[in-house]
């Protein structure tokens, strides 16, 4: 089992949030990536609050689909910057993203077919929060040590987030 598979418990900000942004441990030094990470945490907390409030499975499913699209868009952006900067961990990052997307998609599929969607929603929240906190701190934060290649990245805006459907 890799270190990424044994992440620390994500830091919770309060009873309503499942995970919080930790500036010291999670900052990558790339503004667009840090902003997207904060947005991912925000959306994961929205899923958590909806789940706690007893949202209907169809409402949870909409949030899960949105999260999946957002994550895929974010991963592409982050992978491009790591490649551009020739970060040593870019291949590890690419493989970790592929594993996460596969596991996430499987859990979301199970959510649709499961007799107990509440249990699957808990599994998805736990898996996503633990993975996100661990991955940001252990892999993405390595971007701090990969200098920007040129002005292109500085002028590069983040990709537009997926729109809810």
Image (cartoon, rainbow, N blue to C red):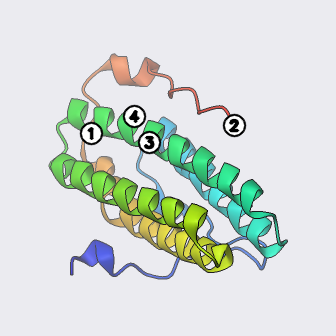
Tell me where residue 115 sits by quadrant.
bottom right
CA distance for labels 2 and 1: 27 Å
Which label lies toward us, 2 or 1?
2
Looking at the image, tell me whether mark 2 or mark 1 is earlier in sequence order.
Answer: 1
The answer to the question of whether label 1 and label 3 lie on touching residues, with beta carbons closer than 8 A, is no
Label 3 sits on residue? 72
> How many angstroms separate mark 1 from mark 3 (CA)?
15 Å
In space, the residues marked 2 and 3 are separated at their CA atoms by: 14 Å
Labels 4 and 3: the sequence-earlier one: 3
Element under disc 2: loop
Within 10 Å of disc 3 (Cα), the crowding (few <14, some 14-19, many 20+) is some
Q: Quadrant of residue 30?
A: top left
Instruction: Pick the quarter of the image with the N terminus.
Output: bottom left
- Which residue: 54% across, 76% down? 123
Q: Which residue lies furthest to the right in this view?
A: 53
Q: Position of residue 102 (x, y in %)?
A: 35, 57
Residue on which the image places disc 2: 164
On the image, numbered disc 4 is attached to which residue?
Answer: 77
């Amino acid at each position: 089992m890799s270190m990424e598979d044994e992440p620390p418990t994500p830091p919770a900000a309060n009873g309503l949030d499942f995970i919080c942004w930790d500036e010291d441990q999670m900052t990558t030094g790339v503004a667009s990536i840090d902003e997207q990470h904060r947005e991912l945490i925000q959306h994961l907390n929205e899923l958590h609050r909806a789940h706690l409030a007893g949202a209907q499975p169809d409402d949870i499913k909409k949030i899960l689909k949105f999260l999946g699209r957002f994550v895929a868009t974010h991963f592409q952006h982050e992978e491009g910057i790591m490649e551009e900067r020739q970060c040593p961990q870019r291949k590890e990052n690419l493989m970790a993203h592929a594993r996460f997307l596969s596991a996430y998609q499987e859990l979301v599929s199970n959510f649709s077919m499961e007799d107990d969607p509440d249990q699957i929603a808990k599994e998805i929240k736990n898996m996503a929060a633990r993975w996100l906190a661990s991955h940001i701190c252990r892999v993405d934060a390595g971007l701090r040590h990969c200098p920007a290649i040129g002005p292109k990245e500085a002028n590069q805006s983040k990709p537009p987030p997926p729109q809810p459907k």
